[in-house]
């Protein structure tokens, strides 16, 4: 869950799974997290809905450990 200031700067990030409030400084999340923003479309029971949530790194790791097919991980060699 993300909250922004009136000027559009990131103010708060809370993990939707465990409720942990992540550190945000100067509009930048300072802890590992993943933000999912997905617009459901045809052929789903959620057609027309947009779902958005945040997970802290620990919750993300716990969820992907349960996957039958592991996540594809590609190491970055350059950082922007």
Image (tube, rainbow, N blue to C red):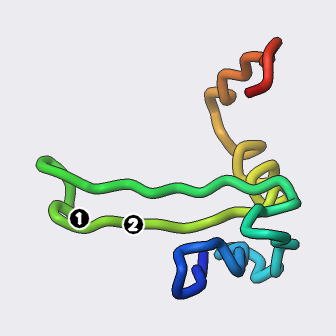
Marks counted in the figure total 2
Q: Which mark is residue 75?
A: none
Label 2 packing within 10 angstroms: few (<14), some (14-19), many (20+):
few
Mark 2: secondary structure: strand
The mark nearer the N terminus, 2 or 1, is 1
- Residue 38 shows up from this direction: yes
Above/below status of 40 relative to 71 = below
**Residue 55 placed where, x, y %?**
69, 63
Question: Which residue is nearer to you in this view: 13 or 51?
Answer: 13
Q: Nearer the viewer, mark 2 or mark 1?
A: 2
Res 1 visible? no
User: Position of 9 compared to 38: left or right?
Assistant: right
> Are the residues flagged by discs 2 and 1 in contact, CB closer than 8 Å?
yes
* Quarter of the image with the C terminus in it: top right
Q: Residue furthest bottom?
A: 6
The residue at 75%/56% (across/down) is: 33
Q: Residue at x 59, y 84 (%)?
A: 5
The location of residue 24, given as percent across then percent down, is: 82, 72
Residue 62 drawn at (x, y percent): 80, 54
The N terminus, quarter of image: bottom right
Within-10-Å neighbours for mark 1: few <14, some 14–19, many 20+: few
| Residue 7, image x, y percentages | 54, 80
Residue positioned 39% across, 66% down in the render = 51
User: Residue at label 2?
Assistant: 51
Q: Secondary structure at mark 1?
A: loop
Q: Residue at x 80, y 69 (%)?
A: 26
Q: Which residue is mark 1?
A: 46
């Amino acid at each position: 869950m993300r909250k922004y200031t009136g000027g559009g700067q990131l103010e708060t990030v809370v993990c939707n799974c465990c409720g942990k409030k992540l550190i945000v400084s100067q509009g930048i999340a300072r802890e590992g997290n993943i933000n999912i923003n997905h617009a459901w479309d045809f052929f789903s029971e959620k057609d027309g809905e947009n779902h958005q949530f945040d997970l802290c790194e620990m919750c993300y790791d716990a969820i992907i450990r349960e996957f039958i097919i592991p996540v594809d991980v590609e190491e970055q060699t350059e950082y922007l």
